[in-house]
Amino acid sequence: MTKTDKHKNGVAGVIYLARFENNDIGDYSEHFINKGFGYAVRLSNGVISMSKEVALDYETNPQSITRKRILKVVDTFMDI
């Protein structure tokens, strides 16, 4: 995986919204491009994954971030 800052505001914003669905999700630390060309996000207490599209959409069109899209991200959360 390659560390990146691309779409950092979008990634952090999606994490913020995900916390409303699961308050066990920790704070953003950093993110990486994963094998599927999405983002693997290191949190203060685990990891979570999201597509580049959801991060980009948060930055450019936040209204397109539906609860269904957030729940898809929340489902990838793994605590450590």
Image (cartoon, rainbow, N blue to C red):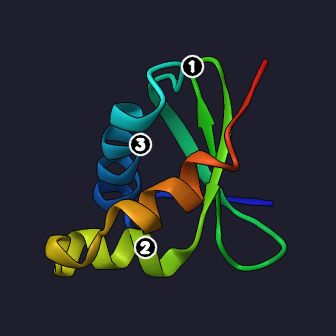
The image's mark for residue 54 is 2
Secondary structure at badge 1 equals: loop
Q: Earlier in the sequence, mark 3 or mark 2?
A: 3
Q: Quadrant of the C terminus?
A: top right
Q: Is residue 79 left or right of residue 69?
A: right
Determine whether 80 is above or below 41 in the image.
above
User: Residue 67 location in percent, x, y?
Assistant: 35, 60
Residue topped by disc 3: 18
Look at the numbered discs 1 and 2 and tell me whether their residues touch, using CB distance below 8 Å.
no
The residue wearing badge 1 is 44
Observer-nearest of 37 and 17: 17
Question: Which quadrant, please, contains the N terminus?
Answer: bottom right
Whole-angstrom CA distance, mark 1 to mark 3, is 14 Å
Residue positioned 41% across, 55% down in the render: 11
Q: Amino acid at mark 2?
A: Val
Pair 3/2: label in front: 3
Residue 64 in percent (x, y) is at 24, 79
Cα–Cα span, label 3 and label 2: 12 Å
Kind of residue at badge 1: Ser
**Coordinates of residue 78 in the picture (x, y in percent):** 75, 33
Foreground tag (1 vs 3):
3
Residue at (30% x, 79% y) in the render: 57
